[in-house]
Image (cartoon, rainbow, N blue to C red):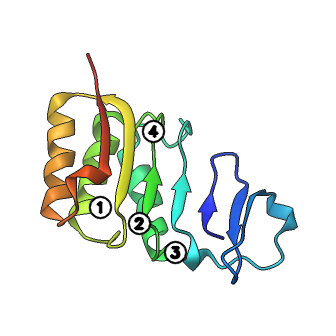
Amino acid sequence: VSKVNKDWTFDVRFEDDDVKQGVAQDALEVCTVDSVKVLDLSGNTRIGDGGSETLSLVMELASLLPCLEKLDLSGCALREAGTKEMCRVIASNMLDSLRTLSIDDELTPDAASALKQAWKAAGKDESGLYINLSD
């Protein structure tokens, strides 16, 4: 499994680098989650503003997905509390392999600035952080 899509289907990369997209969960006999590089949770508003729930989810992801390179939390309604917890996770370097993070939740300038600082302090390339500021 190389990607988990927001509709909970999977993109599977085979040993010959052939990729099958949109594989249903029940079609997988063996799933090695440690190979997942892309996790798209965009539009999942159940993650929401509950900072501790967000932190718990991301910490679990960090331990289960050591190869995770791209995380899309766009439209997950993280807002202030969730963003604050995300900053703590980034600063802890628990997601060491993460190269791209998308949060499109109309963050305030302060929340966006804190996220950018945590991303930079973790030694991550600024071009990998995608944020949408509120008007």
Residue 116 percent coordinates (x, y)? 18, 47
Which mark is drawn over residue 59?
Answer: 2
Per the image, the residue denoted by label 3 is 64
- Closer to the chain start, of discs 3 and 1, is 3
Q: Quadrant of the C terminus?
A: top left
* Element on which disc 4 rests: loop
Q: Work out how far the residue at label 2 is from the one at label 3, CA to CA, in angstroms.
A: 9 Å
Q: Is residue 9 above or below residue 16?
A: above
What is the three-letter code of the residue carrying label 4?
A: Ser
What residue is shown at x 45% (from left), y 45% (from top)?
A: 73
Name the residue carrying label 4: 74
Q: Which residue corresponds to the image point at 71% horizontal and 77% vertical from the top-left?
A: 14
Marks 4, 2: nearer the viewer: 4
Q: Distance between the residues labelled 3 and 4?
A: 21 Å
On screen, residue 135 versus residue 3, left or right, reads left
Mark before the other along the chain sequence, 2 or 3: 2
Q: In this view, does 94 lie to the left or right of 113?
A: right
Going from N to C along the chain, the mark reached first, 4 or 2, is 2
First in sequence, mark 2 or 1: give its number.
Answer: 2
Amino acid type, residue under disc 1 in the picture: Val
Callout 2 amino acid: Met
Measure the alpha-carbon separation of dots 1 and 4. Answer: 17 Å
Q: What residue type is labelled 3?
A: Leu
Name the residue tied to disc 1: 89
Evaluate if marks 2 and 1 touch, with contact meaning CB atoms under 8 Å apart: yes
Real-space Cα separation, disc 3 to disc 1, in angstroms: 15 Å
Mark 3 vs mark 4, foreground winner is 4
Identity of the residue furthest to the bottom in this view: 15
User: Which residue occupies the extreme right position in the image?
Assistant: 27
Mark 3 touches mark 1? (CB < 8 Å) = no
Please determine whether, in this image, residue 132 is positioned above or below residue 11: above
What number is the disc on residue 123?
none
